[in-house]
Amino acid sequence: MKRRKFTSEFKFKVVLEALGERYSIQELGRKYEIHPTQITTWKSQFLKNGQAVFDRPVKEAKSEAEEKEERMLKTIGQQKMEIDFLRKALS
């Protein structure tokens, strides 16, 4: 039997229903065909890590390729300005 993989959207949906307490964990397990222990695990993970949703995202460091591309574009722009200046000076 192959293991099922659940998307984060699906897990979020199930956890929100569990937090709403409209249905019991057992009822949600039957509804979504998931073991109630799994729902409880997802719920505790959400409650433990839920504050991370509101944390400011840390600006990711640029990769080496992005930095190289940025330097090249800057150089190209500078050379284009020099060429334009020289064309005007020679005219």
Image (cartoon, rainbow, N blue to C red):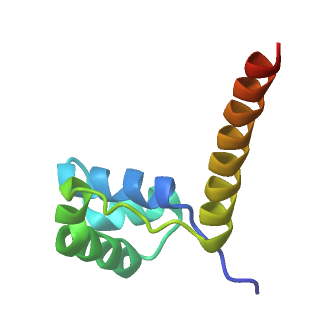
Query: Is residue 21 among the parts visible in the rendering?
Result: no
Where's residue 3, x and y in %?
A: 68, 82
Between 8 and 39, the one lying in front of the other is: 8
Where's residue 50, x and y in %?
A: 21, 64
Residue 8 higher or lower than 86, as above or below: below
Where's residue 8, x and y in %?
A: 49, 60
- Which of the image's four quarters has the C terminus? top right
Between 19 and 21, the one lying in front of the other is: 19
Q: Is residue 47 left or right of residue 6?
A: left
Residue 77 higher or lower than 23, as above or below: above
Q: Residue at x 82, y 20 (%)?
A: 90
Q: Residue at x 68, y 67 (%)?
A: 65
Outermost residue, front direction?
90
Where's residue 57, x and y in %?
A: 30, 58
Q: Is residue 47 left or right of residue 14?
A: left
Query: Is residue 12 among the parts visible in the rendering?
Result: yes
Q: Residue at x 67, y 65 (%)?
A: 68
Between 36 and 89, the one lying in front of the other is: 89
Q: Residue at x 62, y 47 (%)?
A: 74
Between 73 and 50, the one lying in front of the other is: 73
Outermost residue, bottom direction?
1
Q: Is residue 64 left or right of residue 9?
A: right
